[in-house]
Amino acid sequence: MEFSLNFINSLISSAKEHRKYSPNPKAIPDSFRTIQNGKDELYNALLFEAHKSMQEPINDYTEPLLCCVDLDLDKSGIITKFVSEVEVEVTYANGEVKEYNNVHELKIFTSPIPYDRHLNAIQYCNPTKLIEHSLLTPTVNCKITVPELKALCKQSGLKVSGLKQELINRLIENYAYPKITIYHGPPGTGKTYTVLKLLVKMLSKLPLNHRFIICAPSNVGTINMYTRARDLGINCTLVMREDKIPAGTIITDEEREKWNPKTARIVFSTVSGRCGSILKREQFHSVIIDEAAQCQEAWAWGLLRTEVINLIMAGDPYQLPAQVSQDGKDLNYGISLMERLMKIGHTSILLNTQRRMHPNIVEFPNQQFYNSKLLTNFDINENYSIKPYEIISIQSNEEKTGTSFSNEIEAKLVISLANKLKQTFNDTIVISPYKGQCELLQKLDPSLIIHTVDSFQGKEADAIIISTVRSGKNIGFWQDYRRLNVALTRAKHVLRIIGSINTWKSSNSVMTSLANYADENAYVKTVSPVDLLKLNIDIRLIDIKHFLNTTIWNEPIIDSRVFTSCKSDLKLEHILAKTIVKLCIGTKHKSTSLVSSTVNDNVAVDWCVIIDENSMTTKLRILNVRYNGTNTNILSDAIKTLEKNGPEWNEICKYECGPTSLSSLPFRGKRPPPKVPEIPRNRNRERFAAQNLVASFRK
């Protein structure tokens, strides 16, 4: 894709301007005094977010037109081509094009294009009087009167005479008067379908020159609306860059040839695309916004022009809002127009019958987020023998991955489970809030379909596996109840949630409620290291620490040389962890030697049973881990040391049943008597005794 030098220069200049200019942030109120006042405050909010985005580098870069700064030269440019994941082509203001073999030589920022579009669009915001009234006050949905309708017609350049209330009521019924309509409801209640059926009805009642723009904040949401409208037989046009159309979307060349945004009655675009160069001069009389709860108010106002007489919004305020900076969240910059109007009392239509999810899947979200108002009309297919809902608890170690997190053991369990579910459900999707986990899963199994939770909002699948990742003290992204709601409401037939239920319980958040709900309803299945070994999943020492404390042998004593060997060779650690688990659960083992060697995959683990004087029981001790046939001198030295220091015992009959009290150990030899502690010297007493002895001799 070619970009003109003037365009590149304007982007570089815009990015620099946003980076320099830091407006004075001001909280967005529940309502605005005037339209002009509202425009000023929302413009300032957009400017603040543009400044923030140009200040904070991003790690997710897959498309051109991102701003960048050369770390060595401190020179600003625009990425005009991605050659690969690490190779990019950058164009600078003077026309110089430079190729970078390592993208890490650059500091990369988001593109200023969406902000520039909306900053420009909000200046032209000029809604009709009735829509303006709805934006400013909660007293909406008043019945329109003859004078108001005459004023609106005059504002639109129409001459009217002889209007009667009867005619007005007919106009209202035919959707021909300015108004705001809000549909809200949980996932699966048919918000998109309802809006499209309303569109079909409006098409038949409104004149042919009445045009519709149908938007969503995201490319995925827009494509979803477009394909469903096309399947309903609605003749429409899509305005979207080819590289933005999600992979897997089927659009024929014949279909593309019919697209004409200049003449089409119905046009689909992103909210940002409506303000772009192709559509910004086009007039549309009805605006429909799907996923409206994700659309910042400032972006929505940019759609309101003088010719707009209907604004229809559909969304769920209990799902993820627009992404803004943390400072922006604190100032309500992320709140949507839909959410604000609902808060101040605007009438909305609740869609409360869901048809997407199995009753077991929807039960917790219904109780937790929707006050049990949600009804279910779901056709349960009795042919499926798989449980519809289950939480799999696993205690595994989270790892920091750049600015994200991953969990390798959890990822391997996810892959094993996904392959099993795919035998029944072809449409099996894995979702996680962490990009690091998504990348790890894709690396381990490229055949999996994996999404972040945020990117999968608005979509659905037959079977969903949620990888929660976190197992430490913090649950991270799961603190946001809306993200959890999105994750829990994507599956139709089967939902599996994998994570550390102990971490959830200690988080004092909505995840705690989920853990308690699962316990109360017996939905929890605990996966131990033993289960992981049965699935041929390699484990590490840190992953079995919690498990060992629950076994009869408890945590073994491990010599320092063992840790040194494991640090340099991951295979040794995997075999060692596997062997320790087997020993600690009482795997049968017979030996006539004081030191045993368990060999697995050419790796030998040398161990013995020792007397722990502190706990007064026997314990396992790991002496060494080595490749079979190497370092045998350590083994012989260990045997000699044990024979020398004693006491000796017969571990054949005692290993299987675990630790025994010290007094009942079956010693083959005599237990050496304990050392008598030395009594500290008392020199004064000794001197006194000596004096008495000398005195007795004198007598």
Image: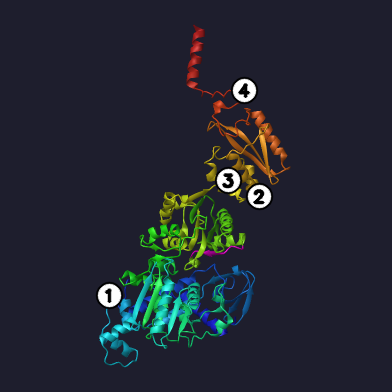
Q: How is the image coloured?
A: rainbow
Question: Where is 119 relative to 369, above or below?
Answer: below
* Residue 235 placement (x, y as % from top left): 48, 82
* Residue 184 or residue 20, whichever sits in front: 184
Three-letter code, disc 1: Thr
| Marks 3/4: CA–CA distance | 38 Å
Residue linked to disc 3: 530
Residue linked to disc 2: 571
Three-letter code, disc 3: Val
| Marks 2/4: CA–CA distance | 41 Å
Query: In the displayed image of the protein, which residue is found farthest to the top?
Result: 699
* Residue 357 placement (x, y as % from top left): 45, 62
| Marks 2/1: CA–CA distance | 69 Å
Whether 447 is among the magenta residues is yes
Three-letter code, disc 2: Lys
Which mark is nearer the camera, 2 or 4? 2
Of the two numbered discs 2 and 4 on the same chain, state the one appearing first in sequence: 2
* Residue 573 or residue 259, whichever sits in front: 259
User: Can residue 120 be seen?
Assistant: no
Residue linked to disc 4: 670
Three-letter code, disc 4: Lys
Residue linked to disc 1: 139
Of the two numbered discs 2 and 1 on the same chain, state the one appearing first in sequence: 1
| Marks 1/3: CA–CA distance | 63 Å
